[in-house]
Image (spheres, rainbow, N blue to C red):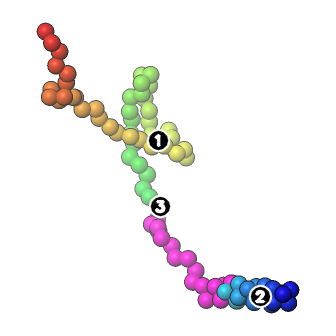
């Protein structure tokens, strides 16, 4: 029984080693799946926005820092969606 288990373990080890060697020998290098930019992107245009505290936010002052701008709008609620109050 011990001899049979020994040879089975050796066989599994040889199989795993062979599979790993074949993968290393015949494996393809991973392909690049993304966007490649040959040149750097142009700088963003100058933006000056009013801040809530009354100051001015300038995008040029944020150079070398990560920043994002979100432009959104709120829409008025249509008359059909407003609650009707009893008089």
Residue 72 percent across, percent down from the top left? 32, 37
Residue found 65% across the figure and 89% down from its top: 22
Label 1, residues with CA under 10 Å away: few <14, some 14-19, many ≥20: few
| Nearer-the-camera pick, 80 or 4 | 4
Residue found 41% across the figure and 49% down from its top: 44
| Nearer-the-camera pick, 63 or 37 | 37
For label 2, the residue is 8
Q: Quadrant of the N terminus?
A: bottom right
**64 to the left or right of 38:** right
Residue 10 in sight here: no
Identify the magenta region.
20-40
Q: Where is 65 relative to 83, above or below?
A: below
Label 2, residues with CA under 10 Å away: few <14, some 14-19, many ≥20: few
For label 3, the residue is 40
Q: Quadrant of the C terminus?
A: top left
**Secondary element at image label 1:** helix
Circles 1, 2 touching at the beta carbon (< 8 Å): no
For label 1, the residue is 60
Give the mark nearer the N terminus: 2 vs 3.
2
Residue found 43% across the figure and 52% down from its top: 43
Q: Where is 13 relative to 84, above or below?
A: below
Let me know if residue 29 is in the magenta part: yes
Hey, which quadrant is residue 55 in on the image? top left
Hey, which quadrant is residue 23 in on the image? bottom right
**87 to the left or right of 11:** left
Residue 12 percent across, percent down from the top left? 73, 86
Let me know if residue 70 is in the magenta part: no
Give the mark nearer the N terminus: 3 vs 1.
3
Label 3, residues with CA under 10 Å away: few <14, some 14-19, many ≥20: few
Real-space Cα separation, disc 1 to disc 2, in angstroms: 69 Å
Hey, which quadrant is residue 7 in on the image? bottom right
**41 to the left or right of 72:** right
């Amino acid at each position: 029984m011990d001899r049979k288990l020994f040879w089975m373990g050796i066989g599994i080890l040889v199989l795993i080693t062979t599979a790993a060697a074949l993968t290393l020998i015949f494996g393809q290098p991973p392909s690049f799946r993304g966007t490649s930019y040959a040149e750097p992107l142009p700088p963003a245009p100058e933006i000056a926005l009013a801040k809530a505290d009354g100051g001015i936010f300038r995008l040029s002052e944020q150079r070398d820092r990560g920043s994002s701008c979100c432009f959104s709008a709120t829409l008025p609620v249509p008359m059909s969606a407003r609650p009707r109050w009893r008089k």
